[in-house]
Image: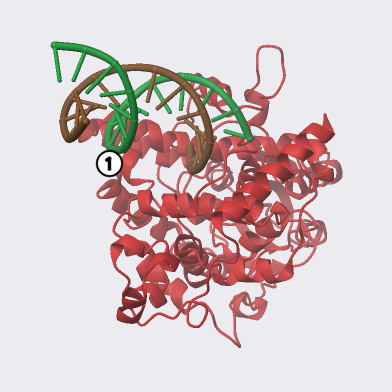
Chain colours: A red, B brown, C green
Amino acid sequence: MTNNTLFLFRNDLRLNDNTALSAACQTNQPVIFLYILDEKATNDRYHDIGSASRWWLHHSLFSLSIEIEKFGGYLNLRKGNTLKILNEFIDKENINKLYFSRGYQPLEVKTENEIYARWHKKIELKRYAGYSLFEPEQIHAANGQTYKVYTPFWKACLKQPIPALKNKFKPPTKKTRKKFRSDNLKDWKLLPSKPDWSKGFNQYWCPGEQGAIHALNKFLNSGFFEYDYGRNRPDLVATSRLSAHLHFGEISPARIWHEVKNFTNKHNIDHVNLTSYLRELGWREFSTHLLFNWPELANKPFKKEYKTFPWRRNKKNLTAWQKGLTGYPIVDAGMRQLWYSGWMHNRVRMIVASFLVKHLLIPWQDGEKWFWDTLVDADLANNAASWQWVAGSGADAAPYFRIFNPILQGKKFDPHGNYVREWVPEIRKLSNDVVHEPWLADKQQLSNAELALGVNYPKPIVTHENGRTRALSAFKKFKSGSN
DNA sequence: TGAAATGTTGGGGCG
DNA sequence: ACGCCCCAACATTTC
């Protein structure tokens, strides 16, 4: 019986520029491709894979299995405990090499440690980077400390070499056609039914490696040339929308890095756009490293004193926020875009997050959980780090007095009201001067717009002035008490 | 990658 | 022509 190489897919659901996969395919042995749905080991124990992510995962795995079958391979799917399933394969299928990509979430780290502890003396184990551009061990200050502030972190990163692109994927020379007790993807029931809320998703997303490459090319040829400005405009399609593709590893950050750089040079794009875009990739790196270094990031405030912050848990307000019924068009538009499409524009994420945490004083964890369940790009590190940034409890966080004004933000970044009109049809007929503050419309305007505030669209659940004042005094009091 | 309050400046109306 | 006031525009400070 010949030896086999086992390749374990994780959040690297792509063939190209996948260092670990290339290495596995170059072992000159038959390769068994395996994906394990281990709901207890992907994220931490409070973060089972969210509903929107399940939808994406289904389609991404389907797409990957098609690509593998094109070269005569087969993607084996198994659900359950990672160690147990690996054990079964290693035991029964004559595996002498196990290769995979490195993960940075707490339970991924734990799983890797267990794999090494169990098999490092018995078979060849190889682990490769790829999910991030820089390894956490690689980026630290001169004194050895890990960075807690973004700007010096990113400066240090930019001094490091960027991983080179691997060649185009080459299938293993020895084929493995056999199917090893694979589950049927459909039986995992990753897709919603009763009700099927994913109809909107299909019109926005094409999960899988080809979809990722298509999204990148589309971005390069449209929004990228004025990214520095356009990235803040939710009414325009000006951002890359690669977040979910990146999360599932359908495209590598290294590939994005090289492609945006090459495109900038080739087409004389103003470098300010390149710098801004790379900076966003940098935030992803920063979050990934933070979570790796502080595994509790997704559950506990990074700044410990925030453990005692007097949040106001209020189910009614939380529900209004989740459903997009706060009475603030820009907030409601964002929350409805999220519900319908599984995604929200980043500028609007900041606005709705600030509203929840500051105006409503609801704990950031409640918002983080909602995003976790509803975002197709839900990423433990990005989600947690960003919520903590808004709440003020994170590393390098926004100061407590930085409170977004949802009216001003709306006027500034959705100047024609196109974004709020798209997602909040109730206010579609309001004129531009009041579309971001419907409560200022006079009787005539309201009747022209067929709008009855408090009837078919809510009045603000808290006035901006009261919300702001309440937040400022709560945070101020907390600051003076905790020092 | 904030917004509001407060301070400063300077042009123009007006007695 | 002058002083005074108002206020917009911008700058700085504060939360």
Residue A183 vertical placement versus A245 (above, below): below
Give the residue drawn at x 63%, y 56%.
Answer: A356
In this view, the residue farthest toward the bottom is: A194
| Image coordinates for residue A31, horizontal then vertical, percent | 60, 55
At 66% from the left and 76% from the top, the residue drawn is A188
Of A333 and A60, nearer the camera is A333
Does residue A415 appear in this view? yes
Residue B11 image offset from top left, x and y in percent:
18, 25
Location of residue A218 by image quarter: bottom left
Residue A158 percent across, percent down from the top left: 48, 23
In-image side of A370 versus A409 (left or right): right
What residue is at 67 percent from the left and 40 percent from the top? A392
Total marks shown come to 1
Q: Is residue A139 above or below residue A470?
A: above
> Would you say A15 lies left or right of A80 here?
left
Q: Residues within 10 Å of mark 1 (few under 14, many from 20)?
A: some
Answer yes or no: is residue A250 visible. no
Chain label for disc 1: A
Nearer the observer, A241 or A159: A241
Q: Secondary structure at mark 1?
A: helix
The image position of residue A384, as x and y in percent, is 67, 48
Amino acid at circle 1: Glu
Please state, as top left, top right, bottom left or bottom right, where the C terminus of chain A lies in the image: top right
Quadrant including the N terminus of chain A: bottom right
Q: Which residue is mark 1?
A: A226
